Amino acid sequence: MGSIHIGAEVGEIAETVLLPGDPLRAKFVAENMLTDAVCYNNVRGMLGYTGYYQGKRVSVQGSGMGMGSTAIYVNELIETYKVKNLIRVGTCGSIRADIGVGEVILCMSASGDSGANNAYFGTMHFAATADFGLLLKAYEVAQKLNIPTHQGSIFSTNTFYDDNPQRWDKWEKHGILGVEMESQILFTIAKRLNTKALTILTVSDNIRTGIAASAKEREQSYTDMFRIAFELA
Ligand code: HPA
């Protein structure tokens, strides 16, 4: 028996799961970077695969966009499938002119505007942070593979579209590197359910300069980020 949104049998999902937002990116990396990959989920087209990376068993599961969708998959992966390591591999908008499209960010923490966080903590503010062991290992792997990375904090938002052109100024001032839509809730749920989480991002667009990657590039590039993440299995 699977969970509500994942059709896999218990045991079909590995202890370490990579979570791209886009299910077609899950398919692409399963077919191009894993051996013996088997698709275990097609419910709502949110594809998930288990295969082997350099002999190590690992899964890759689409999370969808945004914290609502991500929270559903993260909860079910942990509660039903007993997943231990959740590694989001996604894209972000850079809010710094000097961090360009294609550059990789290893995320230490996620600030954000998530209503789900307010629901859990009321007027208090939980500092959503990545697992230090996974972060350190990702950094060491990146060094070994000669992949340059930025380490720092990001912002998870519920609103991709916003009218305010000064929206990111105060966050840039407070050291935030990029903006995405999933990590704050990933880090919070992982902590609450006693599992480990990390986010690795590739910059898909620079909000300051307006330079952006195409949809095709979003689907098919980003190999460096996945190489780092698969090494963590
Ligand atoms: N905003 C929010 N999420 C994103 C962005 C962005 O500009 N780019 C990639 N994910």
Image (spheres, rainbow, N blue to C red):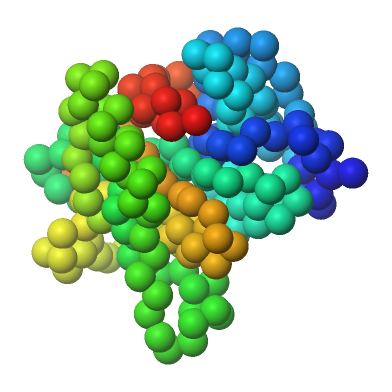
Residue 49 in which image quadrant: top right
In the depicted structure, whether residue 232 falls above or below residue 124 = above
In the depicted structure, whether residue 44 falls above or below residue 75 = above
* Residue 216, position as x, y percentages in the image: 44, 21
Q: Is residue 198 visible?
A: yes
* Residue 4, position as x, y percentages in the image: 81, 52
Q: In this view of the protein, which residue sits in the foreground, 55 or 128?
A: 55
Q: In this view of the protein, which residue sits in the foreground, 209 or 52?
A: 52
In the depicted structure, whether residue 195 falls above or below residue 147 = below
Tell me which residue sits at (33%, 51%) in the image. 132
* Residue 196, position as x, y percentages in the image: 48, 51
Mark count: 0
In the depicted structure, whether residue 170 falls above or below residue 28 = below
| Quadrant containing the N terminus in the rendered view | top right
Q: Is residue 221 left or right of residue 117?
A: left
Q: Is residue 72 visible?
A: no
Tell me which residue sits at (76%, 32%) in the image. 12
* Residue 94, position as x, y percentages in the image: 24, 45
Tell me which residue sits at (19%, 40%) in the image. 150
